[in-house]
Amino acid sequence: MQIRDAYKARYGTDATVVSRAPGRLEVLGNHVDYNAGCVLSVAVDRYMTLAASPCGGGVCRVWDEVLKEERVFSLEGLLEHEKGDWANYIKGVLVEFGKRGIPVPAFNAVIAGNVPLSAGMSSSAAFEMACGLAFAKLANADIDWIEMAKIGQGAENNYIGAKTGLLDQFSSLKGKADSLVYSDFRSFTAKSIPMPKGLTFVVVNSMVKHVLTSEYNDRRQACEKAVAIISQRHPEVKALRDVNSTLLEAERRHLPETSYKCSAHVVGELERVAACLECLKQGDVVRFGQLMYQSHESSRTLFENSCEELDEIVDIAHSMPECLGARLSGGGFGGITVHLVRSEDAESYASRIAEAYLAKTGRKADTFVCAAADGAKLL
Ligand code: GLA
């Protein structure tokens, strides 16, 4: 059922606002956003949608059309929450609006979506951005896109407790059909780069749920520790973005092993993203794919945010000639892998890799072909 119809069926009236925000694939640049670097990502044709209308009073009702569950909460009691509940993303966004002095009137809403949950495709950021756009409309507020991204990040950092960066929200907001998103997390800018012709991404979901709180936050701390230590001798270093591999090696003996390894991953990713930009300019898609494989290897051995299932999928990809490159995508610790393949091979590749994974491990993976899509909007 379309979201507007679902809203009408539930509340008997038309929704006054409908928003839609895509999930994303992180193409290259793993754990680089909160280190002030540049990342290549792509918004894809999987969305979270929300339909809402103001309802008067101070109580909000939200129906999840996929889970068939309702949440009812008071705007007065936004800080009360049960850990892990899906309504926390809504409440967290409302709290961020409140902090900015933008009161959102009470509403009835229906939500739906087909971004896989807890898989590394940013279902949560897509949900936050769908909420953010709709709430801005309900509040009659004009919020620029960077502030909107920060509202989503604020919900993650302050309400959910995941110290995530801005990549997911940037990608969901700034996606464009047939394009990659190149985001710079120092200048807070994002631009579109055409997707190389004839290529597409296949997602292979390991179905291992990833939970991005403690391990993610630990990795982030390890990076920050490295910056604190390196900057004692090199005050110009404000973030890992300011560190190259030569400097990192020179500083290695001052760093705890974990901080060194995490930093080596991030610095490598910074270099790979820069190299990938060159490949995109020159149409060198073979090297593009190799950079993706290298990124995964670095996650596996240095950042240690891969897992057996993800490694297995990427290994199988490596043995299949249709695949140019594959890697884990997003936070890691489970979830999806992203595979760069020629468009004409995509469907058959998706089923062949799932079969090969099943045959080798006895485990089932979910696969789908993604198209690069436009960013979040009101419909
Ligand atoms: C998650 C976070 C992002 C980013 C990626 C890793 O998706 O939400 O901010 O750090 O992990 O690159």
Image (cartoon, rainbow, N blue to C red):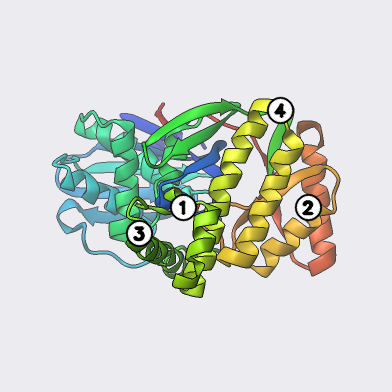
Kindly tell me whether residue 12 is visible in this rendering. Answer: no
Mark 1 residue crowding within 10 angstroms, few (<14) / some (14–19) / many (20+): many
Q: Which amino acid does label 4 sit on?
A: Gly
Q: Which amino acid does label 1 sit on?
A: Val
Which secondary structure, mark 3?
helix
Q: Is residue 120 left or right of residue 37?
A: right
Q: Mark 1 points at which residue?
A: 243
- For marks 1 and 2, the one nearer the N-term is 1
* Quadrant of the image containing the C terminus: top left
- State the residue at coordinates (55%, 39%): 40
Q: Name the residue under label 4.
A: 283
Q: Name the residue under label 2.
A: 317
Query: From what the image shows, is residue 183 above or below residue 154?
Result: above
Q: Name the residue under label 3.
A: 231
Q: How far apart are marks 1 and 2 (CA)?
A: 32 Å
Q: Nearer the viewer, mark 1 or mark 2?
A: 1
